[in-house]
Image (cartoon, rainbow, N blue to C red):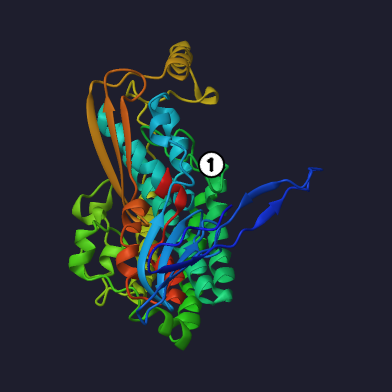
Amino acid sequence: MSAATNRPGVDQRSVEVDFPVDDFGGAGEALGTMTISDEVALGENQRLMTLNMGPQHPSTHGVLRVLLKLDGEVITDCDPVIGYLHRGTEKLGESHRYAQLIPWTDRTDYVAAPMNNLGCVLAIEKLVDVTSPERAQYWRVIMSELARIASHLVWLGTHALDIGALSMSLYCFRERELIMDIFETFCGARLTTNMMEIGGFSRPIPDILPGMVRDFCNVFPSRQQEYVDVLSANPIWIARTKGIGIISPEAAISYSLTGACLRGSGINYDIRKAMPYLVYDRLDFEVPLGTHGDTFDRYLVRMEEMRQARKIILQCLDQCEKMDTPLMAYESPYVIPPHKGTMTTAEDMQRHFIWVIKGFNPPVGEAYAAVEHPKGENGYYFVSDGDAMPYRWRIRSPDFVNLGVLPHLAQGAMLADVVALIGTIDIVLGSVDR
C-alpha cells in the first residue's frame, strides 16, 4: 500500500502493516493492510487526529465502528458506522409465513427476546383481529417485565464494567441467571426464547413456574440494594457519569429518543401508559423520570424501572392465581390448533395439519403495534396483500434510533467518556443492524 498523497497544508503519514496467514499451512501471504494516518493542520496551534474505535473493540458491545476526530483528547466529531451485523431480516420476512417470523425477532435484541416476540405477535394479532385470553395477557406481561429486568441487568453489568467496576458484572449476571432459569423452565430456551405465539401460549404454564417467579421477586430487592451500595455513592462512578452525556429535553425529542434515553431527560412518555396494550392499564406502576438528562440520571431511571417491573410482576401473579382459563384463543382460524398431545378429534388433527403446512392468509390490510421495550419503543409494521407471507415487514428498532444521538453526546466530550456514552444509550447491534 503506497503512502497517502500529501495535500497542501496537511502532513500525512501512513504505516503499512501486513498480517501473514500461516495458521493453516499457508505460504505467509499478506491477508490485508491497515493504514494509520495522522493529519496535522499546519499554520495553527491545533492538531486533529482521526481515530477508529472498533468495529472490534471491548467497549462497543458488538461490531460498531465509531470514527472519532480528536483535538488532543477532546472529541470534535463522531460518526458511528453501522451495518457490520446486517442480515436483511426485514427482507427475509417477505419470504416466510407470519408464524415463522417470530423466531427472527429473537435474533434482533437477543438480550430481551420475549419483548421482541411480543411486539411482533401483537402486530399480527391486530392484522387478523385476534385477542389473546386474559390469563395469557397477564403471563405475557410477566415474561415481558422479567425480560426488562434481565435486559437492564446486562446493561448495568456491562456499563459498569466499561467504566471500571468489575464486580457489578458478576453481581448482575448472578440475578440474570435466575430469570434465564425461569425462561428455560417455561419454554426450554434461555436466550432466543421464541416464547410468544399468535393468540397467546400453546404450551401450559408449568406448576413450579409461579413459585420460581415469586422466589425471584422476593430475593431481588436485597440484591438490587447491593448494586446501589456499590455504585450510587462511589466517587469514581459519580465522576464518570454525573454531568456526562447530557441530553436536553429538546434534543431528546428532536432525535426521536424513547425509553430511558428520553425519560432520563424528564420527558414522560411510556407506551405502557400512553398507548396501553395487554393489561397494563389495569396495573399500578410509576414511570421514573430524570431531571438533568445525564448518564447518572439514565442509570437512576433504569434502576427504578427494575423496581417497578417487579411490582408489575407481583400484581400479575396475584391475578393469575384467580384464573383457570385457557392460554390460547383456539377459536380463531388464524391461531395454531392444539399440539398433538392435546388433540381430541379428527377435525383437530386435520386443522393442525393444514395450519402447519399451509399457514394462514390474513386479510388485505396493514397493522402497526409497539411495546415499551427495555430500550424504548419497539414497533412492528405489517402490510398484507392477502398472501400467506407479508408483503412488507418493518421493524422500528429503538436501538437504531437512539444510537443517532451519539454524535450529539460526544461533541466536546473526552475520549475516555466515549465508552460511557455508548453504554448509557444501551444498544444491541443485532437490533441496530437487523
Closer to the camera in the image, 44 or 301: 44
SS class, disc 1: helix
Residue type at mark 1: give it.
Cys
Residue at the image position 48 percent from the left and 83 percent from the top: 229
The quarter of the picture where residue 391 lies is: top left
Q: Is residue 253 left or right of residue 355?
A: left
Q: Position of residue 37 (x, y in %)?
A: 50, 64
Q: Residue furthest toward the right?
A: 25
Residue at the image position 44 percent from the left and 60 percent from the top: 66
Q: Is residue 343 left or right of residue 74?
A: right
Q: Is residue 256 left or right of residue 15?
A: left
In the depicted structure, whether residue 382 falls above or below residue 147: above
Residue at the image position 42 percent from the left and 39 percent from the top: 196
Residue at the image position 78 percent from the left and 43 percent from the top: 26
Q: Position of residue 88 (x, y in %)?
A: 43, 36
Q: Is residue 16 left or right of residue 431?
A: right
Q: Residue furthest toward the front?
A: 8
In the depicted structure, whether residue 377 falls above or below residue 127: below
Q: Position of residue 134 (x, y in %)?
A: 31, 41
The quarter of the picture where residue 118 lies is: top left
Q: Which residue is mark 1?
A: 187
Residue 316 appears in the picture as rendered: yes
Q: Position of residue 259 (x, y in %)?
A: 30, 60
